[in-house]
Amino acid sequence: MPLKAPRGFIEETDPRVSQIGHAAPPWLVNYADLMTELVCFFIILYALSAALNKNIVGAAQKLKKMMQQDKMHGSVSIDKDGLKITLDEQGQVAFFKSGSADTTAQMQALLAKIAPTLKGLAAHHDILVEGYTDNQPIHNEYYDSNWELSTSRATSVLRLLVDQYGFPPQHMGAIGYGQYRPVVPNDTPAHKAMNRRVVFLVKSGEAAPLPPPVPPQAANTAATPASAPAAQSGAPAATPAGAQLPQAASP
């Protein structure tokens, strides 16, 4: 006896029946489109997080105007990572002594101009100093490669910002990329000068708050002993309860 089809049964040959798996409900199409749009929306917000920060935008505009007025070689840009200030050695300007991490007077003069603006951001954002070199090989008693040289140069700039301009060291970092991230090919002296650069990356995210300063008196005050030794004060030492004092010897 053949089985009777249940009420409301649809034949498999009916076009309303999905050929693979179960038929999706009609609302699922609109729901999937909504989820896709939300993902795109949050990706755009993440990419523009630095651009939406008023402090970073204001600093970028100020630095761009300063670089144009003083004819400083470099660029200022904002991307998903944060604010990037690039200074390169175009023209006759040298940031460091040849084969060394010692900054020149030109580099120190540039830092004096941009440091006040960067310091205003250092209180709430982490700042990374990046060092880059050209592809000229180096091997001396101090550096075995351009990696060590670029890292040492970035650290030298960081130390100037911290020691001379009071940048918070908790929000500072240094890194060296050597010759491996050129902006142009190292085929001419002018291009090599563009690749010898220092980049300041102000991260878009809020940095951890700085710890409160320790009062000088609290840091320098030593613990005072509760009582002075009896030998120094001249007073007899206290005798524990139940103990007997030794008898004096007869003359």
Image (spheres, rainbow, N blue to C red):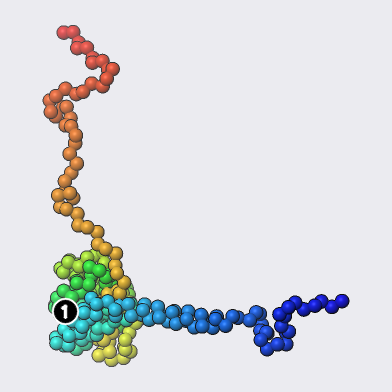
Q: Residue at x 43, y 79 (%)?
A: 38
Q: Where does the image place residue 186, in percent across and percent down from the top left? A: 31, 88
Q: Residue at x 14, y 86 (%)?
A: 70
Q: Is residue 203 left or right of residue 94?
A: right
**Does any portion of residue 214 appear in the rendered image?**
yes
- Amino acid on which the number 1 mark rests in the picture: Leu
Q: Where does the image place residue 92, in percent across and percent down from the top left? A: 17, 87
**Does any portion of residue 97 appear in the rendered image?**
no
Q: Residue at x 14, y 78 (%)?
A: 113
Q: Is residue 44 left or right of residue 243?
A: right
> Can you name the residue that lies furthest to the right here?
1
Quarter of the figure that contains the C terminus: top left
Q: Which residue is mark 1?
A: 110
* Quadrant of the rendered image containing residue 72: bottom left
- In depth, the one of 49 and 247 nearer the eye is 49
- In depth, the one of 225 and 130 nearer the eye is 225
* Quadrant of the rendered image containing residue 19: bottom right
Vertical arrangement, residue 146 with respect to residue 246, above or below: below
Q: Where does the image place residue 107, in percent across and percent down from the top left? A: 17, 78
Where disc 1 sits, the SS reads helix
> Can you name the residue that lies furthest to the left here?
234
Quarter of the figure that contains the N terminus: bottom right
Q: Where does the image place residue 53, in percent across and percent down from the top left? A: 27, 76
Q: Residue at x 20, y 57 (%)?
A: 213
